[in-house]
Image: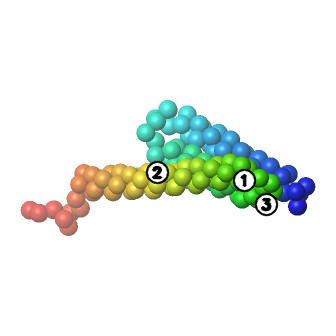
Amino acid sequence: MELIIPPVAAAIEFIGLIVIVFGCVVAVSRLVLAKFDFNNLETKLVLASAISLALEFKLAAEVLLTVTIKSINEFYIIAAVAILRIIISFVLHWEMKELEESKVRTLKREASLFNFLKPKSDEDKVF
């Protein structure tokens, strides 16, 4: 087990790294297409989703590494890292939820404005 788990955990962590890099590339490309509009909710959601997914991979690797613990100090280190990653994951999920709700509010506001400005049909006109 001690020979198999560390390389498997390293491979899983590497997958998390690839997810982060890919998410950053996609977010930067969206940022460029949005002409560096830093308030673009889609860009923030893409990056937050990538980071959240990468943290899940990193946490999975940490869980695997708990099998190879040899001392209580190693346990404390792995537990601290896992707790930090869980906290960061919760914060990211909360932020993504807030961004999605903000996006929905913006879409509703734009739809109501569109309906207000839309010309009325002949049936709706009052003579």
Q: What element carries label 1?
A: helix
Earlier sequence position, callout 2 versus callout 1:
1
* Front residue of 127 and 107: 107
Front position among marks 2 and 1: 1
> Which label is found at residue 95?
2
> Which label is found at residue 72?
1
Q: Are marks 2 and 1 in contact (CB under 8 Å)?
A: no
Does the rendering let one see residue 85? no
Distance from Cα at disc 2 to Cα at disc 1: 34 Å
What amino acid type is highlighted by mark number 2? Glu
Q: Residue at x 28, y 56 (%)?
A: 112
> Which label is found at residue 29?
none
What amino acid type is highlighted by mark number 3? Val
Q: Classify 10 Å Cα crowding around label 2: few (below 14), some (14-19), many (20 and above).
A: some
> Which label is found at residue 67?
3
Residue 43 screen position, x and y as percent = 52, 44
Q: Which residue lies furthest to the right in this view?
A: 3
Residue 105 screen position, x and y as percent = 34, 55
* Front residue of 79 and 122: 79
Earlier sequence position, callout 2 versus callout 3:
3
Distance from Cα at disc 3 to Cα at disc 1: 13 Å
Q: In which quarter of the image is residue 28?
A: top right
Q: Are marks 2 and 3 in contact (CB under 8 Å)?
A: no
Residue 126 screen position, x and y as percent = 11, 63
Residue 103 higher or lower than 122, as above or below:
above
